Image (tube, grey):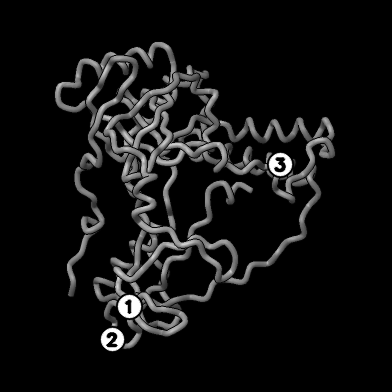
């Protein structure tokens, strides 16, 4: 039997993925770049259904059926179906941005002016060799002025637009989308015309009460990827030799959609009943009133300093009803929000 624990899923200490320097004015700050996220996506390999061994993907010419070596491949930009403009690697190299190893700050802006839709991937910047003092100086200046630095940097041969700001007592950096990469909601056909949307004063009042009843402080450790945890539990059980009985999902019955006012009232009553029940059972209050609003920079720093969530226990699968002792794969748990609704 295979002995296995969740430690096989553990990722070691972060390593610097880039080294360089922040440049603003005549000041240079040596820094190292670290990824700020560790995505926990469960990845599967493709195996042969007959031999249970890995399969290979080959590059095949769709016209001749011949397998091609990597050296035989060209880059082609599709203008129309089966019509391409071929661009050589040498031609692209002449246009590649210069690898300067420098994060060049161009502007300092207010955090509130940046819509979160522009953020792409978050990183941390740590001081490099001999960079502790200028690093601390830049961090303190940005923290006290509540400013965000907009800069450009070349990473992996691609020029990136980035935002640098204080995060939990260190400098954080997020790559950003360029303006022409963000889709305007007004270009989406199914978006309603705000001028044609009208709600009664009573509907708006109940909707606001519902929002207030669900309002609380954001605590990231409260939220878990339940599906990922259940998949990992399933893998672990199968690695231990357990046989799994798969139950067919129950057929969902669509209930008639109530009118808006009825749905709002029912939702509000359900939340109030849930909170009252939680307090009556001696449990802590279901939610607390949100803390008073802080400045954007300090609020962001406070949130980012919160520890990582510890993976919760996945609920065990149900016993099958056929008496074999096999356990069924656990069904996805309904989200808390869905339960309230």
Which label sits in the foreground, 2 or 3? 3
Residue 51 x/y as whole percent: 28, 86
Examine the rendering and report whether any part of residue 169 can be seen: yes
Classify residue 253 as left or right of residue 62.
Answer: right
Check whether the beta carbons of the residues at disc 2 and disc 3 lie within 8 A of each other: no
Q: Residue at x 32, y 88 (%)?
A: 50
Between residues 23 and 229, which one lies in front from this camera angle?
A: 23
Q: CA distance from mark 2 to mark 3?
A: 52 Å
Residue denoted by label 3: 186
Residue denoted by label 1: 47
Label at residue 51? 2
Q: Residue furthest bottom?
A: 50
Check whether the beta carbons of the residues at disc 2 and disc 1 lie within 8 A of each other: yes
Choose top left, top right, bottom left or bottom right for residue 227.
Answer: bottom left
Residue 147 x/y as whole percent: 44, 18
Which label sits in the foreground, 1 or 3? 3
At numbered mark 1, what does the secondary structure look like: helix, strand or loop?
loop
Q: Residue at x 83, y 30 (%)?
A: 201
Between residues 224 and 265, which one lies in front from this camera angle?
A: 224
Examine the rendering and report whether any part of residue 314 can be seen: no
At numbered mark 3, what does the secondary structure look like: helix, strand or loop?
helix
Residue 27 x/y as whole percent: 28, 16
């Amino acid at each position: 039997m295979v002995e296995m624990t969740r430690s096989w899923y553990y990722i070691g200490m972060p390593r610097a993925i880039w080294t360089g320097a922040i440049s603003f004015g005549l000041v240079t700050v040596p820094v190292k770049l670290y990824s700020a996220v560790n995505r926990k996506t469960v990845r599967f390999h493709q195996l042969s259904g007959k031999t249970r061994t890995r399969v290979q993907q080959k590059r095949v010419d769709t016209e001749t059926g011949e397998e091609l070596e990597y050296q035989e491949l060209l880059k082609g930009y599709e203008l129309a179906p089966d019509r391409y403009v071929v661009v050589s690697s040498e031609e692209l190299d002449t246009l590649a941005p210069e690898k300067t190893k420098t994060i060049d700050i161009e502007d300092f802006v207010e955090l509130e002016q940046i819509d979160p839709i522009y953020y792409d991937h978050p990183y941390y910047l740590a001081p490099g060799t001999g960079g502790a003092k200028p690093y601390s100086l830049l961090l303190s200046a940005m923290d006290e002025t509540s400013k965000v630095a907009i800069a450009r940097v070349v990473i992996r041969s691609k020029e990136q637009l980035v935002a640098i700001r204080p995060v939990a007592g260190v400098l954080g950096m997020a790559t950003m989308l360029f303006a022409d990469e963000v889709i305007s909601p007004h270009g989406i056909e199914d978006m309603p015309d705000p001028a044609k949307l009208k709600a009664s004063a009573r509907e708006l009042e109940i909707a606001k009460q519902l929002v207030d009843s669900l309002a609380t402080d954001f605590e990231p450790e409260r939220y878990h990827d339940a599906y990922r945890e259940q998949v990992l539990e399933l893998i672990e059980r199968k690695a231990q030799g357990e046989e799994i009985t798969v139950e067919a999902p129950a057929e969902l019955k669509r209930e008639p959609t109530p009118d808006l006012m009825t749905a709002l009232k029912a939702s509000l009553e359900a939340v109030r009943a849930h909170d009252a029940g939680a307090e009556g059972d001696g449990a802590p209050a279901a939610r607390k009133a949100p803390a008073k609003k802080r400045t954007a920079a300090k609020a962001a720093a406070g949130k980012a300093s919160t520890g990582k969530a510890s993976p919760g226990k996945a609920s065990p699968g149900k016993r099958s009803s056929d008496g074999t002792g096999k356990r069924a794969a656990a069904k996805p748990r309904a989200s808390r929000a869905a339960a309230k609704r």
